[in-house]
Image: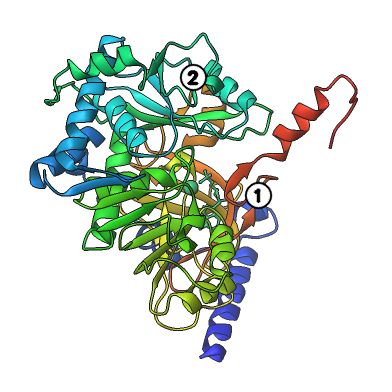
Amino acid sequence: AVGVLVRTAVEGVVSALEVALDGGPQVPLSAVEVLDEVERRRVLSEWAGVAAAEAEVSTLPELFEAQVVRSPQAPAVVSGGVELSYAELDARANRLARLLVGRGVGPESVVAVALERGVESVVALLAVVKAGGAYLPVDPGYPVERIAFMLADAVPVAVVTSRAVAGVIPGEVPAVVLDEPSVVEELAGLSGAPLGVGVLPSHPAYVIYTSGSTGRPKGVVVEHRSVAGLLGWAGVEFGGGDFARVLVSTSFNFDVSVFELFGPLVSGGCVEVVKDLLALADPDAVVGEVSLVSGVPSAFAQVVAGGSLAVEPGVVVLAGEALTADTVAGIRAVLPGVRVANIYGPTEATVYATAWFAGEDEVGAVVPIGRPVAGTRAFVLDGRLRPVPVGVAGELYLAGSGLARGYLGRAGLSAERFVASPYGTGERLYRTGDVVRWNARGEVEYLGRADEQVKIRGFRIEPGEVQSVIAAHSGVAQAA
Ligand code: AMP
Ligand code: MG
């Protein structure tokens, strides 16, 4: 079998060389089309994936409210000894949404949510989108300078917070302090019935900040249609029982939390919100029979290194950084028979863009990031936006309903990364900066970055941002 693969690869090189020579000495090499029709069609349409049907377009409140109707009494969220059913969660979110509408929140406005992890934070995120706003997650554990930057940049209409964490919020942002007696009283007087705010699929659902190479973090604006597309795929992939009880361990500042929270909440599952992934190994931290856990491979590797877990999820979803065969083996050692997924996606393409599921057998040296998820299309292109042959490294470009609107208030930067596609009418491509290749099975393999961006335990960091901050110090002349 190896002989056949090698022969096929060699034949490919030889035929590309023939094509190149056929062009004659006047033709620049860059103008030579090395893919034949069959391979071109394979990488640009068969493997690239299909565009989403318009019928799937929806919004987060609409999807959640449909589930409330289907299973009002089922448990929806559990945390810190509190459990809410779908109907209770919905009513509480509706009350807070009414209060927010009264403070001027509506479509195209941003509302920061700075709360400790727990039931209340889930109520708040839902309330913001029900009021028509886009939520800006503010993890109170982030450095105060970073929090201040995000709030100054996104200019939220309000911040939903609590007395315990309000101290990290700069005074100029109007605050709704949930446990202040006046707010408690106001909420109690509001109706828990649905609001009927006209939220459109093209309205933003959230704004999530990520590191910026020029020294300024950038807010990625993601619309409801993109979230709905992601959740549609997730429901098909995990809705059959995997979402029954999901451990929500990811900071809301990362978009993986969108998958963890809303995947189950639009398909009848229950989310258990815990502090972080270390809860996996702590019998006192988790109360339910967890069916699915997701997290960053390096964080997982650390937790499973302890040798045993307090939970037995049937599915482990790994995302956010390259997955190694060693990490997969380590997880299988403590969770025999577990289904392992390697999922890839930048914030700019709404959580997940490609997915790969490990079979029963041993995992090879390179763990693929797999095939495009429903509604997403993936292209491996060279510097002139032309497809590269199978097995050849190129940059990954993404298209489809998952593409974010762009960076908040940064039209120039958005235009640099979201470019016109030569392969679809009026479509945009997001330039990921990830270097990948197609393998012979039509799966994408991740090879590294085309720029300097790094991931440290899932944190996306542009060294340029660090560099520019250090260089701004009065005692520093230059930084590298
Ligand atoms: P973020 O926007 O924080 O999700 O970071 C996106 C970046 O993380 C991607 O552009 C990749 O460089 C990296 N990444 C995410 N998931 C994976 C994965 N499964 N394998 C390798 N790299 C990944
Ligand atoms: Mg991601």
Q: Quadrant of residue 121?
A: top left
Q: Secondary structure at mark 1?
A: loop
Above or below: residue 334 compared with residue 74: below
Above or below: residue 348 compared with residue 397: above
Write down the residue under mark 2.
154
Q: Nearer the viewer, residue 39 or 433?
A: 433
Q: Nearer the viewer, residue 101 or 120?
A: 120
Write down the residue under mark 1.
450
Q: Secondary structure at mark 2?
A: helix
Task: Name the amino acid type tagged 1.
Answer: Ala
Above or below: residue 271 compared with residue 313: above
Q: Residues within 10 Å of mark 1 (few under 14, many from 20)?
A: some
Say which residue appears at 31% left-offset and 10% top-offset: 103
Q: Nearer the viewer, residue 115 or 425?
A: 115
Q: Position of residue 409 (x, y in %)?
A: 50, 19
Q: Position of residue 314 (x, y in %)?
A: 34, 69
> Mark 2 or 1, which is nearer the eye?
2
Say which residue appears at 28% left-offset and 62% top-offset: 242
Say which residue appears at 57% left-offset and 25% top-offset: 147
